[in-house]
């Protein structure tokens, strides 16, 4: 757990979004408090994405994903667009709001998948599914200059991020020992899908 006397507060952006380490996403920034957040993070370009849930205190769970801003642009509608890349999972505590409504939290590292302890077997089915996804959705594929298809953890994470299932269901797979279960679930989903087509 973070030491409240030494751990700095970091901005938290609640969104109905699920992003795992090495995942990438393009975000639209238009609310004043999040535009001000961009000026706060100029020294390291990092903030936390957390799943929005209005039933929880501060509208987020006690964990989030540390992300780094990798690019930014102004869209055709004059809204700020930023590309972010996920770095790691974090535990969140001591949350508080700034006067402008921006949420801040102290953080501690949160372990994710232990690849050495749970090495997933390679799956050509999942690799093909992700390749198809990149081909069918160029706006998604263009975020990734490199595709690490040799790593089943990377392939599985990217598929889980875009899978149309509730975010709470996806949250089951942030546990360190959950990768084998995820790979099995994804194989079942895409095996069934391939039979239907």
Image (cartoon, rainbow, N blue to C red):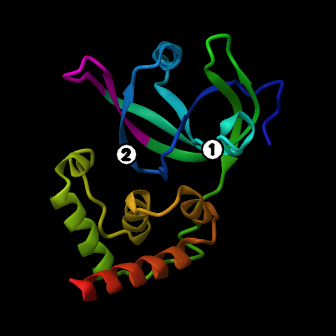
In which image quadrant can residue 73 be found?
Answer: top left
- Between 188 and 153, the one lying in front of the other is 188
- List the residue tagged with mark 1: 53
Residue drawn at 20 percent across, 54 percent down: 137
Secondary structure beneath label 1: loop
Mark 1 vs mark 2: which is more N-terminal?
Answer: 2
Q: Is residue 128 magenta?
A: no
Return the residue found at the far front.
Answer: 55
- List the residue tagged with mark 2: 24
Q: Which residues are magenta?
A: 72-85
Residue 89 pos. (x, y %): 59, 48
Residue 118 pos. (x, y %): 56, 77
Q: Is residue 74 left or right of residue 179?
A: left
Residue 26 pos. (x, y %): 34, 37
Residue drawn at 40 percent across, 50 percent down: 23
Secondary structure beneath label 2: strand
Q: Is residue 73 left or right of residue 35?
A: left
Q: Is residue 6 left or right of residue 86?
A: right
């Amino acid at each position: 757990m973070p030491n409240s006397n030494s751990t700095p507060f970091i901005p938290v952006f609640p969104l109905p979004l699920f992003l795992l380490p090495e995942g990438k996403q393009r975000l639209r920034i238009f609310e004043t408090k999040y535009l001000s957040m961009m000026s706060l993070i100029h020294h390291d370009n990092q903030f936390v994405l957390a799943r929005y849930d209005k039933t929880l205190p501060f509208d987020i769970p006690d964990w989030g994903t540390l992300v780094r801003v990798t690019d930014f642009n102004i869209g055709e509608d004059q809204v700020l667009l930023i590309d972010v890349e996920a770095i790691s999972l974090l535990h969140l505590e001591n949350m508080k709001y700034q006067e402008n409504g921006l949420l801040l939290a102290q953080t501690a590292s949160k372990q994710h998948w232990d690849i050495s302890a749970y090495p997933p077997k390679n799956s050509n089915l999942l690799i093909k599914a992700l390749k198809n996804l990149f081909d069918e959705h160029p706006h998604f594929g263009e975020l990734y200059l490199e595709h690490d298809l040799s790593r089943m953890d990377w392939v599985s994470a990217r598929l889980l991020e875009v899978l149309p299932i509730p975010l709470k269901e996806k949250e089951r797979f942030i546990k360190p020992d959950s990768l084998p279960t995820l790979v099995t679930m994804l194989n079942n989903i895409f095996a069934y899908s391939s039979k239907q087509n």
